[in-house]
Amino acid sequence: MTTLEEAVRLFKPLDPSLMKRRLARPGAMPRVIIDTDTANEIDDQYAVAWALLSQDRMRLEGVTAAPFSFTHHREGLYQAVAALQSGAESNHDSKFVGPFAGWAKRLLADGRTADDIEFVTADVGEQRSYEEILRVFYACGEEPTGKVFRGSPRHLPSYDEPVESDAARFIIDQARNREDGPVYILAMGALPNIGSALLMAPDIIDNIVVVWTSGFPSYAPFSNEPSLNLVQDRLSSRLLFECGVPHVYLPGYHVGAQLTISHPEMEKFVNGRGDIGDYLWDLYTNNPLHKKYAISDHETKTWVIWDIINVAWLLNDAYVPTYLTTSPHLNEDLYWQGDASRHMMLEAYDVARDAIFEDFYDTLKRAPRK
C-alpha cells in the first residue's frame, strides 16, 4: 500500500516564484469552484448563497458536493450516555472523561438516548449535500444544470485508490484549462473530492489554489481531531499539507469561530430578503443540530456560520487577514509539526467579523423572489 511519503513523490514541486503568485491576492473575477458538505449543518448554505449572489465579483465555475459522516462520533456518545446512566460521573469514573459529556447530559435531560441520534454514512451525506446545493441554487434564482456536480460517496480509502466522481473530474478539467488563470477551490468540508483529483492528476497543482477551512492554527499544540472537516478524511487532509499545492489555510477554531450570528440579526437582516433569505431564516430557526445536540433556548444563542470565511477571503483581503508561513506536517495523530524548510502556505489569523456580515447582508438585498 502506498504511503503518504510515496504519494507525495507524484507531485513536482512548484517553483517558489509561482507559489508566491498563486498565494497572492486573486485578480479580478477569479475562477471559483465551491466544494461543500452543504447538508452537514446550516453554514455552507450561507456561503454558497453569498457566492451565487456575488457573481459580479467572481466567475463561479461550479459547486461540487462533498460527503460528510458523523459515524466517528457514535462510540464516544454511546459510552458517555452509558456512563451517565450508570452513575459513573458522580463517582468520578475516568471512563466518562471525554468530549461527549455535555451532549450526553442534554440528551438524557431531553428524555432521549444515543439511539435517537442519526449517524449518517458518507454516501448519505454526499447525497444530502447534493440535494441541498440544488435547493440553495433554486432559492437564489439560479439554474443548477451544468453547475452542480455529484461528489465522492466515501472518504479516500488509500493513496492507491482515488475515488472517481463527477466532482473530481470537474476539478481536473477546470484546473487543466490554463488559459483563464488559476482556479480557487473554496473547500468547506472533508477533502475526498480534492484529494482524489490531486492523486488522479498531480499536474493540476500548478493551476489551482485550495482555500480550506478546518482545524486549529498551524502553531497550536492541540490535536486537530475535533475538526469535522479535517478528521473525516485523514488521508486527504494530510495529503493537502504535503503535496505542495498552493493552499490558503483558514483555521476554524479561534478564527472562523468568530463568525457568529444571532437570532435578532437573522430576523432583521436576513429574513424576508428574497427566497434565499426566507430559506436561511427557516434553517436558523429550525436548526437540525439544535435537536441533534439537544440545545434549548435557541433565541438566546448565536450560531457559528463557519464557512462564509472562504467567500470572505476571496472577496476582500481586509475581511480575513493572513500571513505567509510554511506548510506544517500533519502527523497521523493529527498534531501539527512545524518545519521552516517546507513550501509556503498562506494562513488566516483573524476575521473582520462585522465587515463580513455587513457585506453579506448588503448582498442579500439583491436576492430574487419568485
Image: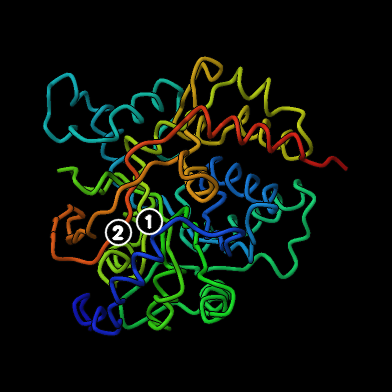
Q: Position of residue 291 (x, y in %)?
A: 52, 31
Q: Which of 232 and 53 is in front in this view?
A: 53
Q: Residue at x 77, y 40 (%)?
A: 367
Q: Which residue is drawn at 53% across and 20% down?
A: 298
Q: Which residue is drawn at 21% across and 35% down?
A: 98
In the rendered structure, find residue 236 and report the number of the disc placed on it: none
Q: Name the residue under label 1.
A: 248
Helix, strand or loop under label 1: strand
Q: Position of residue 51 (x, y in %)?
A: 63, 50
Identify which amino acid the numbered label 2 is placed on. Met
Q: How crowded is mark 1: few (under 14 residues within 10 Å), some or many (20 or more)?
A: many
Q: Where is residue 300 in the image (x, y as percent from the top left)?
A: 51, 14
Assign the C terminus to one quadrant of the image: top right
Q: Mark 2 points at which residue?
A: 345
Q: How far apart are marks 2 and 1 (CA)?
A: 6 Å
Contact between labelled residues 1 and 2, with CB atoms less than 8 Å apart: yes
